Image (spheres, rainbow, N blue to C red):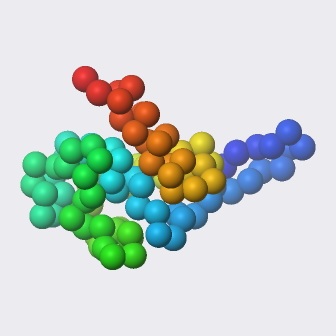
Amino acid sequence: MSSTHAAGAVVPPPDCRPGCGACCIAPSISSAIPGMEGGKPAGVACVQLDAELRCRIFGQPGRPGCCGGLQPSQEMCGASREQAMSWLATLEAATRP
């Protein structure tokens, strides 16, 4: 997914920010994750998050589909890990059943 700026230039989405892991901590995941068969609650780090805050099962079949569908964007990631955590926590609260 890319965005278009006022000048009409298409800007590619950002890569994952090294040392962030916000998308593996802030949201709840109801799907089974290897090592967390019941999913995970919001605010809890996924067991598949390594010491560098990278996904150990990225691109593997056991990775939940919702994880693969979550792509970095300026809106979600913001300018810092703290902004990403805040945005994702707000989204989590707004979509809680």
Q: Is residue 72 visible?
A: no
Q: Nearer the viewer, residue 82 or 78?
A: 82
Which residue is painted at 38% across and 69% down in the image? 53
Left or right relative to 15: residue 21:
left
- Quarter of the image that includes the C terminus: top left
Vertical arrangement, residue 83 with respect to residue 58, above or below: above
Q: Residue furthest left?
A: 37
Residue 69 location, x and y as percent?
41, 49
**Is 75 left, or right, of 30 in this rendering?**
right
- Of 51 and 13, the residue lying toward us: 51
Which image quadrant for residue 96?
Answer: top left
What is the x, y in percent for residue 61?
Answer: 25, 65
* Residue positioned 41% across, 61% down in the render: 21
Number of on-image labels: 0
Residue at x 34% of width, y 68% of height: 55
From where the camera sits, is residue 46 visible? yes
Image point 51% across, 56% down: which residue?
81
* Residue extending farthest bottom: 51
Q: Is residue 2 left or right of 86 when viewed as pictured?
A: right
Q: Residue furthest top?
A: 97
Quick check: 61 above or below 65?
below
80 with respect to 94 (left or right) = right
Identity of the residue furthest to the right in this view: 7
Give percent across and percent down for residue 38: 10, 49
Residue 27: x %, y % from top left: 33, 44
